[in-house]
Image (spheres, rainbow, N blue to C red):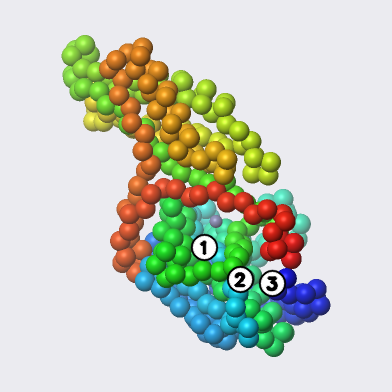
Amino acid sequence: MLYPHSDLLSKVEREVDRRKEEIISFLQDAVRIPSVSCDEAQIVEFLRGKLVALGFDQAVIDKIGNVYGTVRGTKGGKTLVYNGHVDHVPPGEMEDPYSAKIIDGREFGVRGPVIYGRATADMKSGIVSMIMGAHIASEIAGHLKENLTVTGVVMEDATPGHPGPKYLVEKDGLSGDAAIITESTNLGLNLGHRGSSLIVVRFKGKSAHASEPSRGVNALYHASKFISGFEMIRKSFPRHEVLGYPTAAITDVKVYPGALNVIPERCDVFIDFRYIPEYRMGELIRQIENLISRLKTEDNAVTGEASIVRKHLRSHTGLESETEAVNLPFYTSPSEELVKT
Ligand SMILES: [Zn+2]
């Protein structure tokens, strides 16, 4: 068993109840700080201040702008990592997105009062819970046997590939024996998540004036044949016993040059792909290539090429990074020690 025995757990629960008001106002303060992806300077400073005030042994903001802290255990041979992201998607048309007011939850189908505001559920409540949980557990125990690290990462909602958490693992060298992600799951314990990636299939043609289409090769027509055939690929996906089926959805089509009186010389088809450990991305790309080869036997002019979307981003600390839009799937077996604990 890595961590708390049931006695400690019930003491932690009682202490959480006693400090309920403090925890609620910590979450409200966090929600009141806007932290759209790549613009998280204020929230990470706020959280680092909290880690210091709560007596964490370490409270760091790294080069890309992630914040993390550790409660060191007396034995300290093992580390349990709690992970969450501090950024969120833009509020769009949402009314009063950073008010953090307490309202009746009925509006959202929830019984009792709730905190209203962008990123409350996804996932500042998770961030506040893990920080307060780590603090209260170590305070009650007097000391923890093993290390407990909490991480608030940036740029998670910016793109699959997650430059913030990636930096934490690959550049900061942060590691642990087990990790728990505190994304909202209605308080359920989920053992894994499908991977996700963005794929672009690029069709090339030849531009011409629309008044003389026979002088050009219309890349949009080639793409439309591909889109019709894509349905068959989707039907061949295998099912994972817990994570379910992979999904692939065509979400956007862009033509170039995009003038209404010009035959498109290029057409990009974008695919959002969610996948399971048994059906990796290479398999989908192989099937896409097979489909394009089939289309080519019908029309030799078809040229399509699949690749993973890349995104160039700049962190709130000014660090530039180029990220492949890929998150790997993961699944922890119910027989693992962490799950049984
Ligand atoms: Zn999230």
Dot 1 surroundings within 10 Å: few (below 14), some, or many (20 or more)?
A: many
Q: Is residue 159 visible?
A: yes
Query: Which numbered dot is residue 2?
Result: 3
Q: Are marks 3 and 2 in contact (CB under 8 Å)?
A: yes
Q: Nearer the viewer, mark 3 or mark 1?
A: 3
The residue depicted at 47 percent of the width and 40 percent of the height is 281
Image location of residue 136, percent across then percent down:
68, 80
Query: Which numbered dot is residue 103?
Result: none
Image quadrant in which the C terminus is located: bottom right
Considering the numbered disc 1 on the image, is that residue within a helix, a strand or a loop?
strand
Image location of residue 319, percent across then percent down:
32, 65
Image quadrant in which the N terminus is located: bottom right
| Dot 3 amino acid type | Leu
Considering the numbered disc 2 on the image, is that residue within a helix, a strand or a loop?
strand
Is label 1's Cβ within 8 Å of ligand 1? yes
When the figure is inspected, residue 58 is found, relative to residue 255, above or below; the finding is below
Which tag, 3 or 1, sits closer to the chain's start?
3
| Dot 1 amino acid type | His
Q: Is residue 115 left or right of residue 60?
A: right
Q: Is residue 98 left or right of residue 110?
A: left
Image location of residue 199, percent across then percent down:
41, 38
Q: Quadrant of ligand 1?
A: bottom right
Query: Which numbered dot is residue 80?
Result: 2
Which tag, 2 or 1, sits closer to the chain's start?
2
Q: Nearer the viewer, mark 2 or mark 1?
A: 2
The residue depicted at 40 percent of the width and 35 percent of the height is 270
